[in-house]
C-alpha cells in the first residue's frame, strides 16, 4: 500500500496574465490522485486533466488484478496452464519489472501477488504465524518463473497458483504515462500525484521550481524538509499506520518476497528518480533491503536519491542529496 505522505505546494492563484495552475482531486486505481497543470485558461486546463484521467483509467484496465477481464488477470488465470497473448505495453512493463527484480536481488518482485495472506495488519493478529506457515506462503513467488515469448507476444507463469500484481509499481507507471501524454499535448508544466507517487515537470507560473514537502513521521501534520523538484519523480512509502508488534519487534506491512517475513528496521523511504515507476519500485525495495543495504544500493544508482527513516526515527540520506529542514 502506498501512503500519501508527500505534500505538494500547488499554486492555484492567478500569477501571470496568461497562465495559472488548474488542479483536480479524484479517486483512481482505488487511490487519491491530485493532478495539476499550468495552462492559459480554465477550458484548456480542464481538458488536459480530463485527458490524463482517461489515460490513467486505461492503464488501470490493463494492469488491474481486480478486473477479471484485464490482461493481467488472464495471465494469472492461466498460470501453469498456458501462455497468454498480451499487448506490447504490458510485456514491456513486465520486462522492466523483471529487470528490477534482478538488480534488487528479488527485493522487488511482481510475483509477490502469489503470496498466501497470512499476515494481517488490521489489529486482528494475536500471534506470529509459524515458521512453516511463513515458508509455505512464498512457495509460488519467483520472478524467474515468468516466461516471456517476444515472437508470440505471450506471458506464461510456470506454476499453478502463481500471480503477478503491480501494486508496488502501478501507480508510479500511471503517473509517468499521464505525464507523457500531457507533454505530447503541449503541457509544459504540471504535477501528477498518485497518492504519494509523484511526477513533476516544468516550472510554476512564476518560473520557480515546484516544491515537495516530506512529512515528518513523528508528526504527520508537519513537514520536516522541503525540496525543489525539476522534471523528477518522488515516491514516499511508509509504515506509520500498518504494522504489528511481536516480542518488542515492529513488523511493517511490506513483506519481503524472498522470505515471507514483514520488513523491519525502516519506517519511511522517499525516493527521487527520473520516473515514478522506478521510484515506486525502489521505495519498496529499500524497505525490504533495510537501511544499510538500501542506502548503499541507491548510492550506486545514477540520478537516484533517497531519504530513509528507521524505526527509531533516525534520518539517513544518499551521499549527494541536499535538503532544507523545516524548523517550524
Image (tube, rainbow, N blue to C red):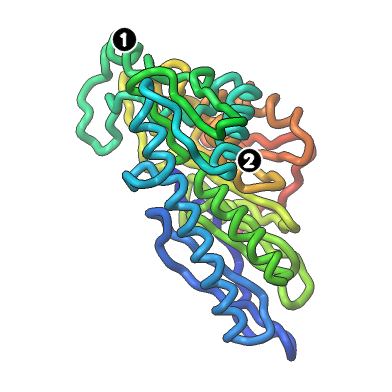
Q: Which mark is residue 173?
A: none
Say which residue label 1 marks.
131
Query: Which quarter shows the C terminus?
Result: bottom right
Say which residue label 2 marks.
278
Residue 305, how many percent across, how many down? Answer: 71, 40
Q: Nearer the viewer, mark 1 or mark 2?
A: 2
Q: Is residue 240 above or below residue 146?
A: below
> On the rendered structure, is 144 left or right of 128?
right
> On the rendered structure, is 324 left or right of 123?
right
Sooner in the amino-acid sequence: mark 1 or mark 2: 1
Q: Is residue 286 visible?
A: no
| Secondary structure beneath label 1 | helix
Residue 327, how many percent across, how many down? Answer: 63, 56
Residue nearer the viewer, 100 or 322: 100
Find the distance from the CA under tag 1 to the CA under tag 2: 32 Å
Residue at left offset 35%, top offset 46%: 69
> On the rendered structure, is 209 left or right of 149?
right
Residue at left offset 51%, top offset 56%: 194
Amino acid at each position: 500500500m502506498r501512503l500519501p505522505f508527500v505534500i505538494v505546494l500547488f499554486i492555484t492563484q492567478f500569477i501571470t496574465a496568461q497562465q495559472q495552475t488548474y488542479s483536480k482531486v479524484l479517486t483512481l486505481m482505488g487511490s487519491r490522485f491530485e493532478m495539476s497543470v499550468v495552462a492559459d485558461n480554465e477550458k484548456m486546463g480542464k481538458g488536459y486533466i480530463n485527458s490524463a484521467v482517461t489515460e490513467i483509467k486505461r492503464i488501470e484496465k490493463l494492469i488491474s488484478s481486480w478486473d477479471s477481464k484485464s490482461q493481467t488477470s488472464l495471465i494469472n488465470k492461466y498460470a501453469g496452464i498456458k501462455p497468454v497473448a498480451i499487448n506490447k505495453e504490458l510485456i514491456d512493463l513486465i520486462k522492466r519489472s523483471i529487470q528490477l527484480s534482478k538488480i534488487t536481488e528479488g527485493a522487488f518482485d511482481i510475483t509477490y501477488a502469489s503470496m498466501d495472506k497470512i499476515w494481517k495488519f488490521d489489529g486482528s493478529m494475536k500471534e506470529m504465524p509459524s515458521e512453516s506457515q511463513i515458508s509455505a506462503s512464498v512457495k509460488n513467488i519467483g520472478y524467474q518463473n515468468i516466461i516471456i515469448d517476444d515472437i508470440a507476444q505471450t506471458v506464461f507463469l510456470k506454476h499453478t497458483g502463481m500471480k503477478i500484481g503491480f501494486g508496488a509499481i502501478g501507480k508510479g507507471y500511471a503517473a509517468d504515462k499521464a505525464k507523457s501524454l500531457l507533454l505530447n499535448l503541449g503541457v509544459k508544466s504540471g504535477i501528477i500525484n498518485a497518492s504519494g507517487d509523484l511526477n513533476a515537470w516544468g516550472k510554476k507560473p512564476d518560473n520557480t521550481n515546484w516544491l515537495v514537502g516530506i512529512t515528518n513521521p513523528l508528526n504527520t501534520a508537519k513537514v520536516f524538509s522541503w525540496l525543489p523538484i525539476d522534471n523528477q519523480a518522488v515516491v514516499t512509502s511508509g509504515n506509520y499506520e500498518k504494522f504489528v508488534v511481536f516480542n518488542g519487534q515492529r513488523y511493517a506491512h511490506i513483506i519481503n518476497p524472498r522470505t515471507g517475513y514483514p520488513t523491519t528496521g525502516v519506517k519511511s523511504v522517499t525516493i527521487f528518480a527520473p520516473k515514478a515507476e522506478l521510484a515506486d519500485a525502489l521505495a519498496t525495495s529499500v524497505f525490504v533491503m533495510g537501511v544499510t543495504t538500501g542506502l548503499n544500493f541507491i548510492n550506486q544508482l545514477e540520478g537516484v536519491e533517497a531519504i530513509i527513516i528507521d524505526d527509531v526515527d533516525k534520518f539517513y540520506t544518499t551521499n549527494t542529496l541536499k535538503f532544507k529542514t523545516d524548523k517550524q
